């Protein structure tokens, strides 16, 4: 399966990449903002996306709206520092399958991927 | 205690708890924070590297976390597991840390507590100006052997 990692922090993108050895996931791209992510969804056709919310150019929720129009079957896991319950619910309503709140531990990332990829 | 002081205490506690959660959860080494003190906007403490977030909505102002590059290097080594970070990576981590600390305060104030994307910089840029119409408090902190500051300027 093809994975797109979207986060404006290169260190967060690296942290997420660290967890992929146990999964049949190939990183096809990384994006630092929602606009870039949207174009990569069109060009690279990923199956799975991890998506930050607070990003420049286009935030993650707006990006999520747009990518769901392109591929409603895309498996999206939102990973965000915005830890109010309403934001998580908004993400789910917009089509995200899972959400995680930062600060996110390595165990929580693994749990998130397990749920997203139906490995539980 | 006046209403303004009570309000500030609630806000400061929210940021301090958020900061503590970050370090406790991700590094397993606790951060110590010390009594906040007031600073004027022309005399703010800035260390080698700073991540700053603008705040709008229900609260207005800013928050920044400023520390030496070595502290952010150690956070990367401890949490990300990347043993050879470069300066750009450390600046990125300063931004991400400030983003998470500010974003988690939404748990207290809800989704009308709006945060900007992080701005990161080294030292004290000459064009850096802080508003002079909001109270600014410095929260000294220490993580492992590293001293740093969280500065909260909020109406």
Image (cartoon, coloured by chain):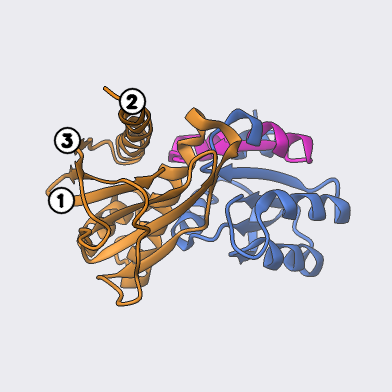
Chain colours: A blue, B orange
Where residue A109 appears, as percent x and y from the top left, is 52, 40
Position of A73 compared to B53: left or right?
right
Where residue B121 appears, as percent x and y from the top left, is 35, 69
Q: Which quadrant of the figure has residue A103? A: top left
Note whether residue B86 is visible.
no
**Are the residues flagged by discs 1 and 2 in contact, CB closer than 8 Å?**
no
Q: CA distance from mark 1 to mark 2?
A: 27 Å
**Residue A103 shown in magenta:** yes
Within 10 Å of disc 1 (Cα), the crowding (few <14, some 14-19, many 20+) is: some
Q: Tell me which residue sits at (54%, 38%) in the image.
A: B58
Which residue is labeled 1 in the image?
B147
Q: Secondary structure at mark 2?
A: helix
- Residue B6 shows which numbered tag? 2
Q: Mark 2 or mark 3: which comes first in sequence?
A: 2
Q: Are marks 2 and 3 on the same chain?
A: yes
Within 10 Å of disc 3 (Cα), the crowding (few <14, some 14-19, many 20+) is: few
Within 10 Å of disc 2 (Cα), the crowding (few <14, some 14-19, many 20+) is: few
The residue furthest top is B1
Position of B69 compared to B153: left or right?
left
- Residue B35 shows which numbered tag? 3
Q: CA distance from mark 2 to mark 3?
A: 15 Å
């Amino acid at each position: 399966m093809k994975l797109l990692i979207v986060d404006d922090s290169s260190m967060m993108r690296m942290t997420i990449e660290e967890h992929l050895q146990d999964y049949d996931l190939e990183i096809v791209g990384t994006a630092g903002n929602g606009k870039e992510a949207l174009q990569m969804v069109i060009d690279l056709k990923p199956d799975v996306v991890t998506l930050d919310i607070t990003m420049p150019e286009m935030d993650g929720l707006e990006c999520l709206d747009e990518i769901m129009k392109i591929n409603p079957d895309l498996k999206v896991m939102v990973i965000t520092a915005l830890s109010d319950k309403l934001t998580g619910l908004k993400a789910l309503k917009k089509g995200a399958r899972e959400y995680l709140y930062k600060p996110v531990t390595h165990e929580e990332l693994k749990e998130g991927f397990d749920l997203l990829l139906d490995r539980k | 205690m006046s209403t303004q002081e009570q309000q500030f205490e609630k806000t400061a506690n929210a940021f301090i708890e958020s900061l503590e959660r970050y370090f406790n959860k991700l590094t397993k080494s606790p951060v110590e924070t010390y009594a906040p003190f007031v600073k004027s906007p022309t005399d703010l403490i800035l260390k080698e590297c700073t991540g700053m977030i603008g705040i709008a909505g229900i609260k207005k102002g800013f928050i920044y976390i400023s520390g030496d590059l070595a502290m952010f290097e150690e956070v990367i080594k401890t949490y990300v597991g990347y043993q050879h970070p470069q300066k750009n990576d450390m600046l990125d981590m300063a931004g991400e840390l400030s983003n998470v600390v500010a974003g988690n305060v939404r748990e207290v104030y809800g989704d009308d507590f709006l945060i900007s994307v992080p701005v990161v910089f080294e030292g004290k840029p000459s064009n850096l100006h802080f508003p002079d119409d909001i109270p600014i408090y410095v929260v000294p902190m220490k993580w492992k052997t590293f001293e740093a500051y969280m500065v909260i300027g909020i109406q």
